[in-house]
Image (spheres, helix red, strand yellow):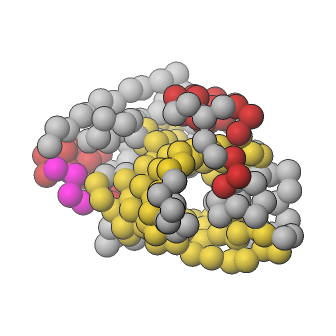
Amino acid sequence: MHHANRCTLEKRHRFCILSNHWDTLSFCRRRDGEMKILLLSAVLGLLYAGLGEAQLLLVPFSGAWKTHYISASNKELVTEGGPFHIYVRHVQFHPNDTADVDFYLKSDGECVKKRVTGVKRETGVYDAEYAGQNEVRILHLSDNAIIVYVHNVAEDGKETDLVGIIGKRDKISDRDYQRFEKETTDRGIPEENIVNFTDNDDCPEE
């Protein structure tokens, strides 16, 4: 397996790790405006060990998250009544190579609480059963935002590409939104297929 290892230090003092896949995973931690090298010794060890324990690096990002925007090649899936019209509330990364996402599905004005569990296929990539089969790929991970790409294959075989961004706060930064827009465009999803979930999020906080 080919492993890529590149680190970039930007003006805002970010430490980024790229995944061992052709798709880029930016993995950033910042505190009080200063660069924090998260578990650097562990990272170096994982690079030599084939990232077999990289899931442990994701555990600190577990906690409360909220949906901000989701785009989809089939917009019906992310409009109210669609299976991906979801309001994320909590993400839990487990050391056993699984991740739980708790969310509300809104249909006919009613918020229904659900949980989906993903099983790690490789670093930053999970397989999950929900409205068919899904490959979930983490594209960007920071203290303030997570961007994911989802390839959904419905039970009838129809394929849909989705990009979502969730945040810790009520607003996300312009930089994070621009990254989300770029990931959406790169996958051929038109801008009009972006749905804003912050404008009508009236589901319970937990």
Quadrant (top left/top right/bottom left/bottom right) for the C terminus = bottom right
Q: Quadrant of residue 71?
A: top right
Q: Is residue 173 above or below residue 79?
A: above
| Of 156 and 67, the residue lying toward us | 156
Q: Is residue 195 magenta?
A: no
With 93 as the anchor, is 79 left or right in this view? right
Quadrant (top left/top right/bottom left/bottom right) for the N terminus = top left
Picture coordinates of residue 161 (x, y %)?
Answer: 53, 45
Picture coordinates of residue 6 (x, y %)?
Answer: 29, 30
Q: Is residue 39 above or below residue 182?
A: below
Decide if residue 177 is in sight here: yes
Q: Is residue 195 above or below residue 78?
A: above
Q: Residue at x 54, y 48 (%)?
A: 160
With 56 as the anchor, is 176 left or right in this view? right
| Of 28 and 96, the residue lying toward us | 96
Give the magenta-colored segment's residue range. Answer: 50-54
Picture coordinates of residue 174 (x, y %)?
Answer: 69, 31
Q: Residue at x 60, y 34 (%)?
A: 189
Q: Is residue 61 above or below residue 189?
A: below
Decide if residue 145 is in sight here: no
Q: Main secondary structure of the magenta part?
A: loop
